[in-house]
Image (cartoon, rainbow, N blue to C red):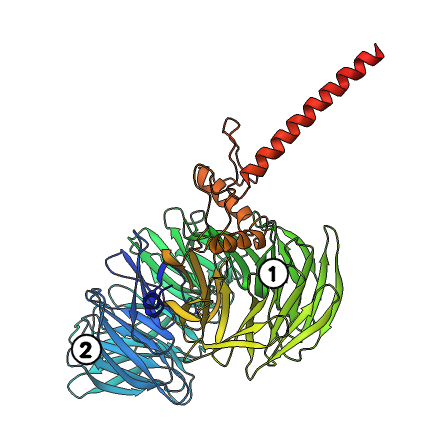
């Protein structure tokens, strides 16, 4: 690379963004144009176009977004965030057409709990979290706060939600722990008037709310698992200054079970009713914490169920129901075929890559940009995942201390190593032949396992670290392994003798360590924001470069030739580096929270990064940084030519590359699915028997010709020998 190219830093462009922050209550919103979805993703708001799958982002928040709302006509979007203890949290109002900020204010402490626009889009009502507890009414046109007060009484719990009426723009409702109140905005006197809903002795934690089109009835879900029906008793005149009557309780309802006798046929929803939605035909959709979705009209109930706690319900084009879950997934459900139409719409690599998180391992396709396979292990979290070199298994480490291996085609469990580590398994790697597995634990031990078809046995335990093992990596010869720990050391182990060779110390908590492609150097990263080059021979420091300016580096990975590597961390920036020069060559900005993992694709054309908010980004590597393989010319004249330095580097890459790449076997799955309309899985690729044989460009054609002549000569000699033998016997 020239000096001009060194100083030039290219922007990495995301090829796909997979993610949805399902932990935000009512965070999934459908725009009134019925063409876009709006939902939070870390500290950004994602605008997702349903027809084209294109995504744009609204950026301006300084921390994680906690609530989102859209104005009734869709002209504006409002969002609130959380902040560190003692600091104030922003509320931002965005213009939909220009995708730009209209105004912002920071009157709430620590967290903005909920937002709602008034029906005439003149006011924005914001509710603060438990550290704030206040309700603020913001005049959007004049860009001022006109009034505010404490949301609850001292004898009740915190308020959790606010909801505006559909016709009366000066009235809204708030609900929470043992409080349900109706508010009226008095603009002239710049104050809020409040009335408590008369619920008698009913004590509930109120969650999701929905109001009928005529503003007569309010339905509220509770964490007790029932639905409360309220008559609001609002004035028939929308311009009335105050309400004449108190809102009253009409009833408390549960789920009808026709199998039980009368009087005992009412059941509660498990884990509470999290959200409610009124359909245009008057039916009520109920979403529960156990994943149950019911469409109810009197005693006529249609049910469906998904995995995870439901946090959002939205309707699209009056025909489809969108469901958001705390597992960072979005499901679509057709109302006409309620029981059987459930499908996954959006979920948190040459052609396929895998991700590991809480309770699941998922295999993704880069061509379809969707999930191909999901492997679920309930109640546990996977901290590390690796493909075996032959592509026949996916090996994963779990926080229950068990190592589990699955098939990449069906997700079937191949084997499990129970009690592999006492306090949980945190990292692992496998040799090129797949017979030796190295794992690291939270207790600080490195353990070596022998993998056989019917039994998995421990070969040895390596004890040197006294902190959690963050990563282990085996060199290309399968003779050494380096372990990185948060105790400030990296240890180079001899896999043959199971002894320590060298120790690397630094004033940091090591988070990642990886061998270079030829195994002579080790690349490390950690909490000191530095990337270190170390000699594997004696553990001496060769070079240090600043890998980040504002936070620890959580992940590093190299391409197959070792020319470039990627780093990412808490600063939310993906950096591509030239290994030899130690300089940045490309930068990717897009993640909204801390990046926890980063991987290079085997073909060197993609980068995949994952963040703590469940977002997965697929980045396109610029073409000039792709892996360059030099092949002979068409006439084969380069076969006997003396190789230059670039040819030598290429042959090294071929030599150190495994005989079968980890993703190649899984690529057969993607190819089989894409070529068959019924999406059946085939492990045996089709072969054209009429195809002409091809010669590998890496094979020496001259020596191949010599071998052919030698074989023909041997065949002639053999025929001559048998002919002479037959004549002798005759």
Residue carrying label 2: 140
Is disc 1 in contact with disc 2, using a CB cutoff of under 8 Å? no
Image quarter in which the N terminus is found: bottom left
146 relative to 313, above or below: below
Q: Quadrant of residue 283?
A: bottom left
Tell me if 399 is positioned left or right of 153 in this view.
Answer: right
Residue sitting at 62 percent across and 75 percent down?
Answer: 539
Residue sitting at 71 percent across and 73 percent down?
Answer: 500
Q: Position of residue 435 (x, y in %)?
A: 69, 55
**Going from the N terminus, do you reach mark 1 or mark 2 first?**
2
- Comparing 232 with 462, the one in front is 462
Q: Quadrant of residue 150?
A: bottom left
Q: Which circle marks residue 396 in the picture? A: 1
Q: How many neighbours does mark 2 have within 10 angstroms: few (below 14), some (14-19), or many (20 or more)?
A: some
- Comparing 147 with 648, the one in front is 648
Res 305 seen here: no
Tell me if 34 is positioned left or right of 20 in this view.
Answer: left
Q: Position of residue 517 (x, y in %)?
A: 55, 61
- Comparing 105 with 621, the one in front is 621
Q: Position of residue 143 (x, y in %)?
A: 18, 81
Tell me if 564 is positioned left or right of 53 in this view.
Answer: right
Kindly state the secondary structure of the residue where label 1 is placed: strand
Image quarter in which the C terminus is found: top right
138 relative to 645, above or below: below
Residue sitting at 65 percent across and 62 percent down?
Answer: 403
465 relative to 16, above or below: below
Kindly state the secondary structure of the residue where label 2 is placed: loop
342 relative to 197, above or below: above
Q: How many neighbours does mark 1 have within 10 angstroms: few (below 14), some (14-19), or many (20 or more)?
A: many
Cα–Cα span, label 1 and label 2: 51 Å
């Amino acid at each position: 690379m020239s000096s001009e190219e060194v100083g030039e830093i290219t922007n990495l462009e995301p090829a796909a963004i997979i993610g949805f922050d399902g932990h935000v209550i009512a965070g999934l919103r459908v725009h009134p144009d019925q063409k876009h979805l709006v939902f939070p993703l870390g500290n950004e708001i994602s605008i997702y176009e349903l027809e084209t799958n294109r995504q744009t982002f609204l950026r301006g928040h300084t921390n994680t977004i906690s609530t989102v709302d859209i104005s009734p006509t869709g002209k504006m979007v409002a969002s609130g965030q959380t902040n560190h203890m003692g600091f104030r949290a922003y509320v931002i109002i965005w213009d939909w057409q220009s995708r730009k900020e209209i105004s912002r204010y920071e009157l709430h402490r620590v967290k903005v709990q909920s937002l709602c626009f008034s029906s005439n889009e003149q006011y924005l009502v914001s509710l603060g979290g438990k550290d704030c507890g206040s309700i603020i009414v913001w005049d959007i046109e004049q860009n001022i706060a006109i009034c505010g007060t404490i949301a609850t009484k001292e004898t009740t719990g915190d308020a959790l939600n606010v909801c505006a009426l559909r016709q009366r723009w000066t009235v809204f409702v708030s609900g929470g722990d043992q409080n349900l109140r109706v508010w009226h905005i008095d603009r002239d006197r710049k104050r809020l008037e409040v009335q408590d809903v008369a619920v008698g002795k009913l004590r509930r934690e109120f969650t999701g709310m929905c109001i009928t089109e005529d503003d007569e009835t309010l339905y509220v879900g509770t964490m007790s698992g029932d639905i409360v029906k309220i008559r609001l008793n609002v004035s028939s005149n929308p311009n009335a200054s105050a309400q004449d009557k108190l809102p009253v309780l009409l009833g408390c309802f549960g789920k009808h079970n026709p199998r039980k006798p009368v009087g005992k046929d009412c059941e509660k929803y498990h884990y509470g009713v999290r959200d409610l939605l009124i359909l245009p035909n008057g039916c009520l959709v109920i979403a529960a914490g156990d994943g149950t979705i019911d469409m109810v009209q009197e005693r006529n109930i249609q049910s469906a169920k998904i995995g995870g706690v439901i946090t959002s319900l939205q309707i699209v084009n009056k025909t489809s129901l969108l469901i958001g879950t705390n597992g960072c997934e979005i499901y679509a459900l057709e109302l006409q075929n309620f029981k059987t139409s459930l499908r996954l719409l959006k979920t948190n690599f040459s052609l396929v890559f895998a991700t590991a998180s809480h309770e699941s391992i998922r295999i993704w396709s880069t061509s379809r940009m969707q999930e191909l396979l999901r492997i679920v292990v309930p109640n546990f979290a996977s901290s590390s995942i690796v493909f075996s070199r032959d592509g026949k298994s996916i090996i994963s480490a779990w926080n229950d201390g068990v190592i589990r291996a699955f098939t990449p085609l069906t997700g079937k469990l191949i084997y499990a190593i129970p009690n592999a580590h006492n306090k949980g398994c945190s990292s692992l790697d496998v040799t090129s032949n797949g017979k030796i597995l190295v794992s690291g634990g939270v207790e600080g031990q490195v353990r070596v396992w022998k993998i056989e078809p019917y039994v998995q046995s421990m070969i040895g335990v390596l004890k040197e670290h006294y902190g959690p093992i963050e990563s282990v990596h085996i060199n290309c010869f399968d003779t050494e392994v380096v372990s990185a720990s948060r105790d400030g050391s990296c240890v180079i182990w001899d896999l043959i003798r199971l002894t320590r060779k060298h120790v690397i110390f630094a004033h940091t908590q090591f988070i990642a360590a990886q061998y270079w492609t030829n195994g002579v150097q080790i690349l490390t990263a950690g909490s000191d924001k530095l990337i270190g080059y170390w000699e594997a021979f004696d553990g001496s420091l060769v070079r240090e470069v600043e890998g980040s300016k504002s936070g620890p580096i959580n992940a590093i990975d190299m391409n197959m030739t070792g020319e470039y590597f990627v780093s990412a961390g808490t600063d939310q920036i993906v950096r591509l580096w030239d290994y030899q020069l130690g300089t940045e060559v490309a930068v990717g900005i897009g993640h909204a929270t801390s990046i926890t993992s980063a991987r290079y694709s085997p073909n060197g054309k993609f980068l995949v990064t994952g963040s703590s908010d469940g977002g997965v980004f697929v980045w396109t590597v610029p073409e000039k940084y792709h892996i360059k393989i030099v092949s002979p010319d068409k006439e084969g004249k380069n076969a006997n030519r003396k190789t230059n330095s670039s040819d030598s580097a290429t042959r090294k890459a071929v030599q150190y590359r495994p005989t079968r790449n980890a993703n190649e076997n899984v690529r057969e799955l993607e190819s089989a699915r894409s070529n068959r309309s019924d999406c059946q899985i085939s492990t045996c690729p089709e072969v054209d028997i009429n195809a002409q044989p091809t010669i590998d460009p890496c094979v020496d054609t001259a020596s191949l010709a010599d071998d052919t002549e030698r074989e023909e000569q041997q065949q002639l000699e053999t025929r001559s020998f048998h002919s002479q033998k037959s004549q002798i016997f005759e």
